[in-house]
Amino acid sequence: MLEWENYVIAIGAYLLGSIPSGFLMAKARGVDITKVGSGNIGATNAFRVLGKTAGSIVLLADALKGFLAIRLLPDLVATIPSESHGMLAGLLVILGHNYTCWLKFKGGKGIATSAGVLLALTPQGLAWALAAWILVFVLGRYVSLASLVAALVLPFAVWLSGGSRSMLVLTAILSAMAIYKHKPNIQRLLAGTESRFISKKNNPPLNR
């Protein structure tokens, strides 16, 4: 890989990921999402604060950032796009979402953006992680716990599906990042104060 290509892909992916979809959607409706609900700019808080339609748009936008970072940036920049280019873009687009430069390096938890990255890089790994998410959520009704279990399952799913060593390392890093961003949720789960999802028309899942 040419060194300048790595720099351009890394910066481009970070800037793409840093687009604060949830913040912009809320701002268009006259709401500062960082000051309502959980204060998180991610899709879950957008669902809770802005409703299903806006929340769905934010979810898709955040996932699309991850997918496009893999599918577009390496092809646009690199002379010979490689798996390493894609993994670099995947890591930086998630970091951009989690620590956006436009909001004083505060962002979301990266779950939707990670899903977009995984869809592009390892769809089989994403399928297993998503299956784990659904199972845990259905049994416990905790969005945060489902996300944590999915993060833990991901590297093992990549390993079992025959992913490369580099992909295994990347997904282990993504898993660690997701768990770290859920630290407050882990504390509430241990204390028994975490909110469950209550199936009501205008009461989307909480993943504060």
Image: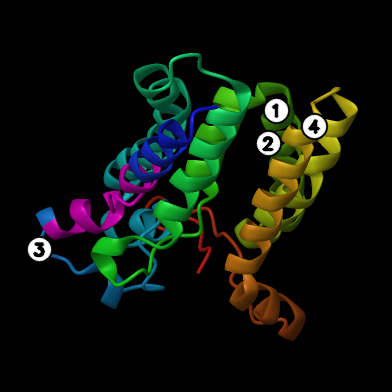
- Indicate whether 170 appears above or below 106: above
Distance Cα–Cα, label 1 vs label 2: 5 Å
Task: Describe residue 178's horizontal placement relative to residue 90 as left or right.
Answer: right
Instruction: Tell me whether circle 3 and circle 1 mark residues in contact (CB < 8 Å).
Output: no
Instruction: Tell me whether circle 1 and circle 2 mark residues in contact (CB < 8 Å).
Output: yes
Q: Residue 188: percent from the left, percent from the top?
A: 66, 80
Q: Which mark is residue 158?
A: 4
Q: Is residue 142 visible?
A: no
Q: Residue 101's quadrant in the figure?
A: bottom left
Report the residue that reaches farthest toward the top: 80
Q: Residue 77's quadrant in the figure?
A: top left
Q: Secondary structure at mark 3?
A: loop
Q: Secondary structure at mark 2?
A: helix
Mark nearer the N terminus (2 vs 3): 3
Q: Residue 97: percent from the left, percent from the top?
A: 41, 53
Residue ID at (67%, 31%): 126
Distance Cα–Cα, label 3 vs label 1: 37 Å
Inspect the image, locate mark 2, and give the three-letter code of the amino acid beneath it: Leu
| Tag 1 residue | 127
| Tag 3 residue | 30
Distance Cα–Cα, label 2 vs label 3: 33 Å
Q: Which residues are magenta?
A: 13-27
| Tag 2 residue | 130
Q: Secondary structure at mark 4?
A: helix
Q: Secondary structure at mark 1?
A: helix
Crowding around mark 4 (Cα neighbors within 10 Å: few <14, some 14 to 19, many 20+) is many
Residue ID at (39%, 63%): 107
- Indicate whether 21 appears above or below 161: below
Inspect the image, locate mark 1, and give the three-letter code of the amino acid beneath it: Ala
